[in-house]
Amino acid sequence: MTGEQRQRERMRTGYDTVAGEYQRRIGGELAGKPLDRALLAALVEQAGPGAAVADLGCGPGHVAGFLAGLGAARVVGVDLSPAMVELAREAHPEAEFRVGDLCELPAEEGEFGAAVALYSVIHLSGEELAAACAELHRVLRPGGRALVAFHLGSEVRRLTEWWGHQVEVDFHFRPLAAVAEALEAAGLAVEVRLEREPGEGEAETRRGYLVARRP
């Protein structure tokens, strides 16, 4: 097992451990995030009628449920954590959920008209980010767009205690340009670049958003 594989296994274990508490604390977060809601609505509208939409790193499924509520014809959530996927299936039967890795997505080529990755690429090393961007390109149909959100910076923070549980989860902070370059290197065209300050109740980190299209 490589170092990256061991880290992903530690991440899976960490998210399995905190899944219930994560759902309780984070599951309603979109109610206080009007910018995120607007970007998700624009993505679904641009995908067009009948398009399937992916929520990559879906956690307990709250974003997938919101996407389904916007009228997306089919929503598929993917998460590395089986415990998260189980919670998502229970809470949001209007969407489909799959256990899977961002670097090896359980999806067909061109399956999705749009994809969302909100704060899921933050757990990926540089090589893993490149692989995940290549997978994003693969699963999007031509003309399909992806919305990617992440923490801005240039450091790696390791979380060893999370809501009273011992974990070992790495968070990669990156400049907006670095993630844009990774998407473009995978063949995606970046159309939108946004940065914002943290909102009320959020962790004190600046946030970056990118919208990229498969030509």
Image: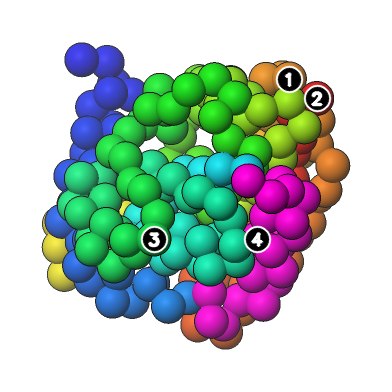
Task: Find the distance from the CA under tag 4 to the CA under tag 3.
Answer: 17 Å
Amino acid on which disc 4 is placed: Leu
Task: Find the distance from the CA under tag 2 to the CA under tag 3.
Answer: 30 Å
- What residue does disc 2 label? 215
- What residue does disc 3 label? 94
**Closer to the N terminus: mark 2 or mark 3?**
3
> What residue lies at 71% left-to-right and 36% top-to-bottom?
144
The magenta span reads: 30-50
**Closer to the N terminus: mark 4 or mark 1?**
4
**Closer to the N terminus: mark 1 or mark 2?**
1
Magenta stretch contains residue 35? yes
Residues at discs 1 and 2 in contact (Cβ within 8 Å) = yes
Q: Is residue 81 at all visible to an observer of this figure?
A: yes
The residue tagged with tag 3: helix, strand or loop? loop
Residues at discs 1 and 3 in contact (Cβ within 8 Å) = no
The residue tagged with tag 4: helix, strand or loop? helix
> What residue lies at 41% left-to-right and 47% top-to-bottom?
77
> What residue lies at 28% left-to-right and 23% top-to-bottom?
5
Q: Nearer the viewer, residue 144 or 212?
A: 144
The quarter of the rendered structure image containing the C terminus is: top right
- What residue does disc 4 label? 40
Q: Residue furthest top?
A: 1
Q: Position of residue 27 (x, y in %)?
A: 38, 72
Query: Which SS does the magenta portion mostly show?
Result: helix
Q: Is residue 152 left or right of residue 202?
A: right
